[in-house]
Image (cartoon, rainbow, N blue to C red):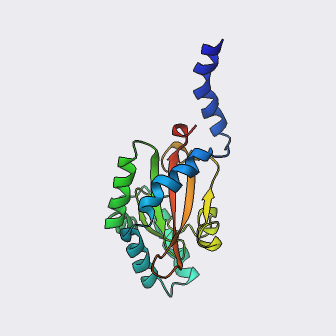
Amino acid sequence: MIRTILMAAPFLVVASLAQGVEAPPAMKAFVETDVAVWAHDAAVMDAVRAQNAVHADMTQARIDTLDLEWRAQVGSDVTPLIDTVLGNPLSAYLRSKVEASGGQITEVFVMDAHGLNVASSGVTSDYWQGDEAKFQKTFLAGTGAMFVDDIELDESTQTYLGQVSIVLTDPDTGAVIGAMTIGLNAQMFF
């Protein structure tokens, strides 16, 4: 009887994940202890500061245009905007963190003060995250904010994951400058 229950447990977890469930506390703890060490690294801060400077006067109309361009490029052979983000040094750094995680991290992306992708370990479904909870519940909430989303099937990685998003605060000024979202393989945290 116990053996039957133990063998069925992974299937029960997957079935419950399909409906969207609350993330386990272990996911938040992992981000606080393991990810926080490198999330505020100089490479992250410098890239976000640089993009914020370039995008200082960006209008919502331009943000919407860029987001439409990104979405049109997803799955296309011609991807100049996506290539700009995925080809930068911070994206390579984020990919190395995903690879070194032993499967715990499925994706990482960093956003600027508008919620636009600065860098990403892989292609995201859109360029502008500013209209989503991952940005609104971190960047707009201020220093120290963390948002742990429900576990769901992520279309971009085809993995059941929970996203944990954190605010990025400039260590020199104390100003909130961006946000980071970390996709975690949910099955590794139950």
Q: Quadrant for the C terminus, please.
A: top right
Residue for point 43% across, 74% down: 48
Q: Position of residue 132 (x, y in %)?
A: 62, 64
The answer to whether residue 165 is above or below residue 55 is above
Q: Is residue 162 visible?
A: no
Residue for point 48% across, 76% down: 170
Identity of the residue furthest to the top in this view: 1
* Relative horizontal placement of residue 145, taking residue 32 as reference (left or right): right
* Relative horizontal placement of residue 41, taking residue 186 as reference (left or right): left
Identity of the residue furthest to the bottom in this view: 57
Q: Position of residue 105 (x, y in %)?
A: 45, 48
- Name which quarter of the figure residue 85 lies in: bottom left
Q: Position of residue 57 (x, y in %)?
A: 50, 88
Residue for point 39% across, 42% down: 102
Q: Is residue 181 visible?
A: yes
Q: Position of residue 71 (x, y in %)?
A: 49, 63
The answer to whether residue 4 is above or below residue 141 is above
Number of marks drawn: 0
Q: Quadrant for the N terminus, please.
A: top right
**Residue situated in front as seen by the camera: 61 or 138:** 138
The answer to whether residue 97 is above or below residue 69 is above
